[in-house]
Image (cartoon, coloured by chain):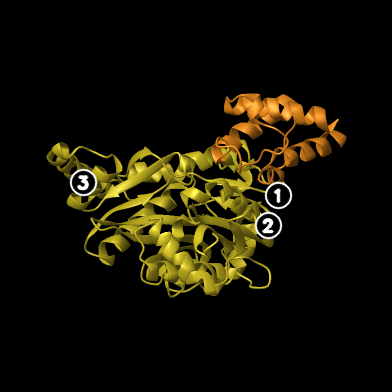
Amino acid sequence: MQEEICSRVCRSAASAWKIDQTQINKDSSMDTITQWDSLGHLKLIMTLEKDFGLIFHPKDTVRMRSIEKICQVIEAAKGN
Amino acid sequence: MPLGKKIEIKNVKPVDYPAVAEFLQQQKASDFTIDQWREKFLVFWDHNPFFREDKHERGWLLRDETCTVCGFLGNIPIQYARCGQEETGFALTTWYVRDDARKHSLELYGCFMDQTGVLINTTPTFEVEELLKGVLKFLPLTADWLKRDYFFPVRSGAFSRYLQERFKLHPLFKSINFAAAFIAMIISNVVARTRSKGPSLVDVKEVIEPPADTQQWWDAFKAEHPFTIARHSMGLRYFFFSGEYLKTRRVLELRSHGELLGFLGVRLVSRPEYSYVEVIDIALFRDDASMYLTLVDKLRELVLRWKPDIAFIKTNAFSEPMRNALNRSGFWSVAGRARFYYFDPQGQIGANEFYGTPLDGDRVCF
């Protein structure tokens, strides 16, 4: 389940930042990806909300600073 | 709370004031000197009657590995009334992060968002505005008064300097601009002086402290508005009569047959090239054009005797009758520039239930 979500998140992130998906994996974070600044974060969250059909809580969105954290938030949301 | 190898985030304490002030001065967050920033911090927190050391944070800062401040977000606690009950809201101020720490700027915002009260941001940059709407789910206040700014030119030379700055006019147009400002001033004064003056149904006078019946008025006012900033005696004292603002703010009270109808608050804004008077708050029970006509006349009188070099009066039309009164009193209007975003963790306040004025947010603190 988490691997599938992680793969979809990486695909969404690549699409949001217009970079190759191979540059993103579950260990990626704001510290490792150049495009992931505040504007990049905005693009990512909006793409994820569209792709997963979710609306994230604002308190979660500011903490979704790594692919792993994003996957956890989405998994929890899907579980609910 | 380490964020990574190099940057840490911490709550701002008074001991951090000098380092934060130095950082903001280096970042050119405004024209303030380090000392002016430190004075501003006193207004935000130490002299703020709504700030509680045991309950609220002054803000948060980022420090690099040399313990140098590389980011800051300020937090101003302000009291609001929600359905008649007072609660604390928080205005964001002065969010600055050094370029090499930008990736941590959202962590600062995360701390701001962790608070339980309504959050206000009235000074977002374009990029932050997109974040607020798209990611952080802030709502824009959609009140009509935000759409247009109204001006009454008092002195044409200084007013033309303001126009030059606001509309970024080419210096070649200086003479034309001056002529336009002069003509605008003449027209405004002719309109204001020749409009019919009916009998004044309200008494308007300047007050230098909250009147004795303020609490009675406030109890009735907050019952009429689902969500609004607290204007009880303590609130009025902080916003208008405290030491920091005593010389730059004035309040007019309105009464009808002795009954307090409400207040209009203004501030003097001083720029190197000109100064102007801005209406920063209006809170009234009744809402008719004749009342506003009297109020506008009194405001003009106040401005003319306040300081000799005031360029113009700036206001917004906070209601349709007020718009009508401003148009009949020789005010000019242009598209408004104010932005106003809020986030209610309880998710209950609709944009049309929030009685906001320029008093909300941090803009009037500067």
Compared to residue B31, the image places residue B125 above or below, namely above
Q: Is residue B199 visible?
A: no
Going by the image, does B152 lie left or right of B60? left
Going by the image, does B222 lie left or right of B366? right
Going by the image, does B224 lie left or right of B246? right
Which chain is yellow in the rendering?
B
Q: Which residue bears the numbered disc 1? A: B345
Chain that bears disc 1: B
Compared to residue B242, the image places residue A47 above or below, namely above
**Looking at the picture, do discs 3 and 1 lie on one chain?**
yes
Q: Marks 2 and 3, how far apart in space?
A: 44 Å
Which chain is orange in the rendering?
A
Please, what secondary structure does the residue beneath circle 2 have?
loop
Q: Which residue bears the numbered disc 2? A: B115
Q: Amino acid at mark 3?
A: Ser
> Which quadrant, please, contains the C terminus of chain B?
bottom left
Q: Which residue is at a point 47% across and 68% down the rendered structure image?
A: B19
Q: Which residue bears the numbered disc 3? A: B160
Compared to residue A15, the image places residue B206 above or below, namely below
Q: Quadrant of residue B298?
A: bottom left
Please, what secondary structure does the residue beneath circle 3 have?
helix
Mark 2 touches mark 3? (CB < 8 Å):
no
Q: Marks 1 and 2, how far apart in space?
A: 9 Å
